[in-house]
Amino acid sequence: MPRLSDPLTQIVILGFICFCCPGMFNALQGTGTYGLRPQDSDVGNNASTALSVVFAFSSLFAGALFNIVGHRLLLILGGLTYVLYVGSFLAYNSIHSIVFVVISSCLLGIGAGWLWCAQGAVMMGYPAENEKGKYFSIFWAIFNCGGVLGNVIPLGLQWNDPNAGGASDGAYIGYMVVMTIGALISVLLLPTSKVVRNDGTPVVKIKYSSPISELKSVFALFKDWRMLALVPMFFTSNWVYTYQFTAVNAFNFTQRTRYMNSMFYWMAQIIASIFYGAFLDREQWSRPTRARYGLILLAIVCAATWAGGIAFQTTFGPQSTILEDGKHVKNPADFRGIDLVNNTSEYIAPFFLYFFYGVSDAMYQGYSYWLMGALTNDTNQAARFAGFYKFVQNLGGVLAPVVQTSTIGNGPSAGANALGATGRGMGEMIVCVVLVFVGIIGGIPVAYKAVQDHTVEDGDDTHSEKHEAAVYETKA
């Protein structure tokens, strides 16, 4: 029977926490406009912007907080903010107040920063050097099962209502119940000091940090050339969600079809993470070779996927307006409105495109985590890396809706932007493609110069005695 103190057991528990909390969030987000009607996309975009702004700055300092209070408290409190967030959309269905939605988005930004920093530190710091890809794939598969299950429930509830405009109250309540369970599961996690690998070595070196020294360590990342080179990749990893979830899924499919698309998007993530994780841990190759081959494979998959995306973009996009409440808004007739039952032949190609959007996203984020994990084995430093990653990632989440609601986007805001829409949304697509490949280019120097067969931590010599003492005490 697996030990509770085994790093893999802890990763599995962490996976189920994220299955319940951000996994359900992803299911809701993946339908586009967070389950709201397509005409309420501005509410979803405002919520996303507020969330991303606070998430970014919360993440930046969450690494310091992790090293002071530990991961369990961050995960419990962070998980509960997901419950409040979904509750705000449930309330919006009745009272149509965006204020509660925005406030809840800001609180989730704080909580999500804590949760994902703790997650990143554990996932990158717990595995041995030759198991980084394996641990990522196990976590990512369990986590994304939440996105799959989170779409099965509302899909079943609304299958016989192809004209539904948004998620039902029952779907929102179901999300909230599962998220609450996930937050409470966090009590099963052990302190990092009690997690021991099978060979008897602890997963973390014993380091005691003051708040001031932690903040200095966080800001030092802005001078680390490896992190700076990866900024474009981090920035892009959440940017594309706005395009995929809203411009593609929300605007072009019926509600039940959106749930089906989202379910298979997250299923694609599970499949891709398993195979890509195994590829990145392939024992026959050295770790620098795996880093290079992994980047090449990522570039090939992204090129094929986004080529298909460009082709699909030519079939939809804003080019006319209608009057709604006295304002010019984008015309829904300019988009596809595909239903998986009523338009099956039209649905097949976009379905596979959306599936491969999920594949490419799992690989893009998986490679980011794998690279960071290859740069450190120390959970303290991994927490800082994870916080920096989420900080930059969410800056992309802040700016992506700005492009989407502009005149070159697929969801131009009401009024002047809707009237001045140009290019049928192709401008938004081009921005996505450029960012994806600039991110891949940024990964080249890290993959080719920074990744070594064995990670040598800064200060290894100064902390070796503490490390050996910790090993001795564990074995005793």
Image (tube, rainbow, N blue to C red):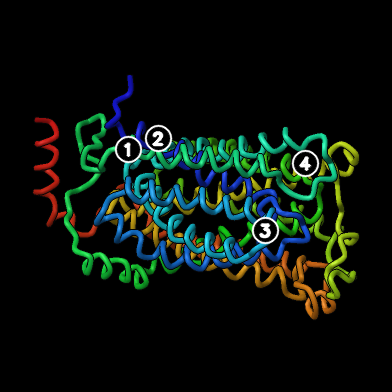
Task: Tell me where residue 398 appears, x and y as whole percent.
Answer: 57, 68
| Residue drawn at (82%, 39%) of the image | 161
Q: Using the rendered image of the protein, determine whether residue 267 is visible from the camera's viewpoint.
A: yes
Task: Tell me where residue 327 appears, x and y as whole percent.
Answer: 83, 75
Q: CA distance from mark 4 to mark 1?
A: 37 Å
Q: CA distance from mark 3 to mark 1?
A: 39 Å
Label 4, secondary structure: give it: helix
Label 1, secondary structure: give it: loop
Disc count in the image?
4
* Label 4 vs 3, first from the N-terminus: 3
How dense is the environment of label 4, judged by Cα within 10 Å: few (below 14), some, or many (20 and up)?
many
Q: CA distance from mark 1 to mark 2?
A: 7 Å
Question: Which residue is label 3 attached to?
Answer: 95
Q: CA distance from mark 4 to mark 2?
A: 31 Å
Residue type highlighted by circle 1: Leu
468 up-or-down from 310: above or below: above
Quadrant including the N terminus: top left
Label at residue 13:
2
Label at residue 189:
1
* Label 3 vs 1, first from the N-terminus: 3
Q: CA distance from mark 2 to mark 3?
A: 37 Å
175 up-or-down from 407: above or below: above
* Of labels 3 and 1, the one closer to you: 3
